[in-house]
């Protein structure tokens, strides 16, 4: 039996469930999740091997920003299109409970320029009646060539198996890029940085989580098998420091404890986490 491969970019609006889907398929949390816009900022590859097929899922940034011209949006656009360019197939995800047809049409108009096959998946269909989607599907089909439509409830693991069976039809003979045990293209330090960013997104508001840079500067396994981790948070504006610290250090304490708990689950080891705030001019 020859090995096959298929590369799929998961595209769609923030909170459509892209990161949740890739985590569910892979079976591990490799992409952070948060209701705030643009949680995913870098393209992350999730790897799933089923029988002779290696599925490579590109978790791309939310596509809300495509018309924006600020510096963060330009970076996100680059990462989104890089993910699309690398892929063989586009999986466009839509939150079925919040369908905005004008937005969807605008997005599909841009995406179809890639000349790649598109599958549309309506997520969160446990929140609505599927028959309400029929006129929406009909309107999309009148304008765009869509290979197939699927209804999912990613959190309840409904429809994912059927979706994978459909995607497998587009796989082609090729050597696998990743080994049987690899589930992503990112290393542990990347995930440590992402977990801290996820905690900061949870507790901080407005622009701060998007204007920081996180570096894991130290990762040491101690003699008792505990893990000591030091992370540096570089911030752009002086006023951020007071907000990140909080009253008597209460905010940074919440962030540290939340992140430490997540890292503990990630490694199944006792974690000693130390955070340091550094003005960006020292980076």
Image (cartoon, rainbow, N blue to C red):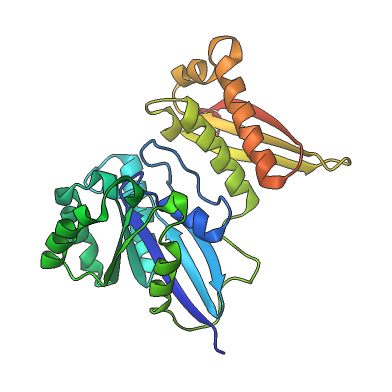
Nearer to us in this view, 238 or 42: 42
In the picture, residue 224 is in which quadrant?
Answer: top right
Nearer to us in this view, 1 or 254: 1
**The C terminus sits in image quarter:** top right
**The N terminus sits in image quarter:** bottom right
Determine whether 174 is above or below 230 in the image.
below
Residue 54 appears left or right of 152 = right
In the picture, residue 144 is in which quadrant?
Answer: bottom left
Q: Position of residue 147 (x, y in %)?
A: 26, 72
Residue 22 appears left or right of 113 = right
Q: Position of residue 93 (x, y in %)?
A: 32, 56
Residue 175 appears left or right of 91 = right
Residue 279 appears left or right of 211 = right
Residue at the spot 47% in from the left edge and 32% down from the top edge: 201
Most extreme residue toward the right, as rendered? 223
**Does residue 201 show up?**
yes
Determine whether 253 is above or below 269 in the image.
above
Number of labelled discs? 0
**Does residue 217 show up?**
no
Determine whether 264 is above or below 99 in the image.
above
Q: Position of residue 24 (x, y in %)?
A: 51, 55
Determine whether 204 is above or below 184 in the image.
above
Residue at the spot 53% in from the left edge and 15% down from the top edge: 246
In the picture, residue 182 is in which quadrant?
Answer: bottom right
Q: Position of residue 222 (x, y in %)?
A: 84, 40
Residue at the spot 45% in from the left edge and 17% down from the top edge: 239
Most extreme residue toward the bottom, as rendered? 1
């Amino acid at each position: 039996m020859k090995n096959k491969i298929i590369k799929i970019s998961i595209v769609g609006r923030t909170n459509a469930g892209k990161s949740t889907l890739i985590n569910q398929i892979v079976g591990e949390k490799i992409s952070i999740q948060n209701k705030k816009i643009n949680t995913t900022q870098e393209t992350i590859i999730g790897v799933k091997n089923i029988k002779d097929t290696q599925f490579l899922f590109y978790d791309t940034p939310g596509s809300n920003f495509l018309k924006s011209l600020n510096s963060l949006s330009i970076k996100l656009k680059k990462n989104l299109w890089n993910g699309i360019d690398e892929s063989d197939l586009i999986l466009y995800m839509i939150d079925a409970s919040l369908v905005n047809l004008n937005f969807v049409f605008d997005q599909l108009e841009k995406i179809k320029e890639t000349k790649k096959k598109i599958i549309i998946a309506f997520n969160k269909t446990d929140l609505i009646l599927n028959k309400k989607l029929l006129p929406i599907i009909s309107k999309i089909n009148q304008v765009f060539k869509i290979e197939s439509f699927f209804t999912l409830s990613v959190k309840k693991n409904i429809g994912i198996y059927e979706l994978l069976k459909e995607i497998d039809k587009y796989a082609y003979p090729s050597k696998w890029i990743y080994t049987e045990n690899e589930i992503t293209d990112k290393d542990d330090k990347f995930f440590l940085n992402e977990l801290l960013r996820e905690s900061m997104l949870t507790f901080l508001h407005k622009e701060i989580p998007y204007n920081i840079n996180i570096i894991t500067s130290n990762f040491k396994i101690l003699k008792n098998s505990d893990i000591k981790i030091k992370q540096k948070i570089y911030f752009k504006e002086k006023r951020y420091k007071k907000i990140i610290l909080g009253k008597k250090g209460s905010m940074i304490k919440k962030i540290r404890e939340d992140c430490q708990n997540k890292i503990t689950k990630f490694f199944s080891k006792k974690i000693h986490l130390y955070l340091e705030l550094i003005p960006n001019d020292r980076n």
